Image: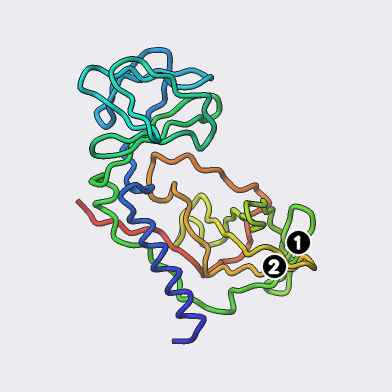
Amino acid sequence: MSRFEVEWQSWHDERETRLRDPRGWLAITAIHWLGDVSERFDDVPGAWSGDARGATVRLDAGESLGLGDDVLGAGSHRLGPLDEAGVTVTFDGGVAQVADRDGRPIVRPRHPDSPTLRAYDRTPCYPPDPAWVLPARTEGDEVVFTYGGAEHRLVAWPEDGGVLWILFRDATSGVTTYAANRQLLTAPPRADGTVDLDLNRAVNMPCAYTDFATCPLPPPSNTLPFAVEAGEQLPRMVAS
């Protein structure tokens, strides 16, 4: 294999390892939307309620949750204020994310024996091809590149470390790739504003793997009129 193929294969293997993480996206067993009425759920200890300011969990005798270095025992505990990332609580057999979604708290447990993780087979990809590493330049909040003799623009969001995050659709969406979108992280743009779009490393959003994720959609302008036959395709699950 060429150096390009070797580096891509190493990246793909690491990606598969992360997907199989027993605390990763495929380990999610539910997304519980909290309200005023306290509720118990089968996949996380405690009785849960919440409002725009955070979540409250009431633990009975014999129940506990880990929160960082602390152990929450019997009684009521307030978690908040919450942001999108929220906090992680641990318990025997799993973990749960407690976070905010548009002013409403959620609890999202993860278990290593989740049905989705057990059913996961693999994520096939298009063969890596250097031709899908497209030179681009940044203009404001867009990356601009040429493909098929035409200029194309994609809205990009700056992330930590100077990298750019791009959500996009293309002519493969809903055919060989996930219908809603795929995502791409670039290297930080160079001093002159140029950046490479390595579409061989376009990957699925968590929503491609579980119904219990809440993923953003790309702006309409980020729909490409051609087929990006590079990067990840639809995940494959083993029939139960």
In this view, 71 is above or below 213: above
119 sits left or right of 169 in the view: left
Q: Which image quarter: residue 93? A: top left
In this view, 71 is above or below 110: above
Residue highlighted by disc 2: 195
78 sits left or right of 114 in the view: right
The amino acid sitting under disc 1 is Thr
Return the residue found at the far front: 69
Horizontal and vertical percent position of residue 202: 53, 63
Choose between 152 and 167: the one closer to the eye.
Answer: 167
Horizontal and vertical percent position of residue 68: 40, 35
Residue 138's disc is 1
Return the residue found at the far top: 37
Horizontal and vertical percent position of residue 211: 39, 41
Q: How is the image coloured?
A: rainbow
Q: Residue shown at 42%/62% (left/top)?
A: 15
Q: Residue shown at 59%/79% (left/top)?
A: 131
153 sits left or right of 89 in the view: right
| Element on which disc 2 rests | strand
| Element on which disc 1 rests | strand
Q: Residue shown at 69%/72% (left/top)?
A: 135
The amino acid sitting under disc 2 is Val
Q: CA distance from mark 1 to mark 2?
A: 7 Å
Horizontal and vertical percent position of residue 49: 39, 18
Which image quadrant: the N terminus? bottom left
Indicate which disc, 1 or 2, sits on the residue closer to the N terminus: 1
Q: Which image quarter: residue 156? A: bottom right
Q: Which image quarter: residue 32? A: top left
Asked if the residues shown at circle 1 and circle 2 are in contact, with their CB atoms under 8 angstroms apart, the answer is yes
Q: Residues within 10 Å of mark 2 (few under 14, many from 20)?
A: many
Choose between 202 and 185: the one closer to the eye.
Answer: 185
Q: Residues within 10 Å of mark 1 (few under 14, many from 20)?
A: many
